[in-house]
Image (tube, rainbow, N blue to C red):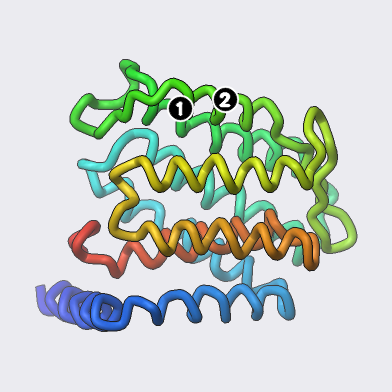
Amino acid sequence: MINLLNKKIKSNEMYKILKTNPKLIFPIFFLICLMHYKYKIVGFIVSLITVLCVPLFIMKKEWENSTFIKVILIALTSLLSFYKLNFKSSFNFNWIITLFLAVNVFVLLFTLVPNFFMEKEGGIMENYWLATLIFILFLCTPFLSISKNNINLSKIILNPDIYVIFFTIVLGVYYILYPLWNEHLHLVIFSLVIPLISHFINNKWFESRALFLCLFIIFDIFDIKNYGF
């Protein structure tokens, strides 16, 4: 009981700091991203922590089913990707990671189109034109290949540069319109824009995007307003 109380106090202190100085989270995210560019093991450590945090999110029963799936997909995809970047392995993760990326986008459709998978009280936003864009984005998922400590995007349907821009715009619109993201809208948009810039500077869009998503999941543990830890 004492340990639980201490954890709650620490979580409250962290929450108060972030709420009083919300802009602190932006340089923290960016600094960790820069550290990953220099030391790739940083991405692996962050993704491993994210995987270990997954049970905490499963315990949050009032979350939408699509959120559960996205958290698990993000955690597994990131861990596999950063593992392959840091350690030698004969196993080919390329198609698995590509599939996970595609499914991660596809899951967003459940929040836009009425279905039996999500609870009605979960906040389904009936937006068919945005759902159409999401579905097109899903179909245009590029092939991801990890080789020589780099993650490269290869064209399947759409040029990777165009895909990254399209991805950023469509998800940006989604975050702006979907009420769930109102509180942290600036942070999720920041987590889209930095990977976009990174893609055209050092070709690390996927790494940056995966890292930011992992950091956001970890951050949500301390955000007691939403998590209540």
- Please identify the quadrant where the C terminus is shown: bottom left
Assign a secondary structure to mark 1.
helix
Task: Check disc 2 and report the residue beneath it.
Answer: 135
- Name the element at disc 2: helix
Residue at numbered disc 1: 109
- Up the image or down, 132 lies above or below 39; here it is above
Q: Is residue 83 left or right of residue 5?
A: right
Asked whether the residues under the numbered discs 1 and 2 touch, taking CB atoms below 8 Å apart as contact, a structural biologist would say: yes
- Which amino acid, mark 1? Leu
Q: Nearer the viewer, residue 174 or 117?
A: 174
Q: What's the residue at 72%, 78% (across, down)?
A: 39
Residue at image location 43% in from the left, 63% down from the top: 187
Q: Please give the name of the residue rendered at 56% of the width and 28% of the height, measured from the top-left corner.
A: 133
User: Closest to the observer: 56 or 143?
Assistant: 143
Q: CA distance from mark 1 to mark 2?
A: 7 Å
Q: Percent from the top left, x then y, of residue 123?
A: 25, 33
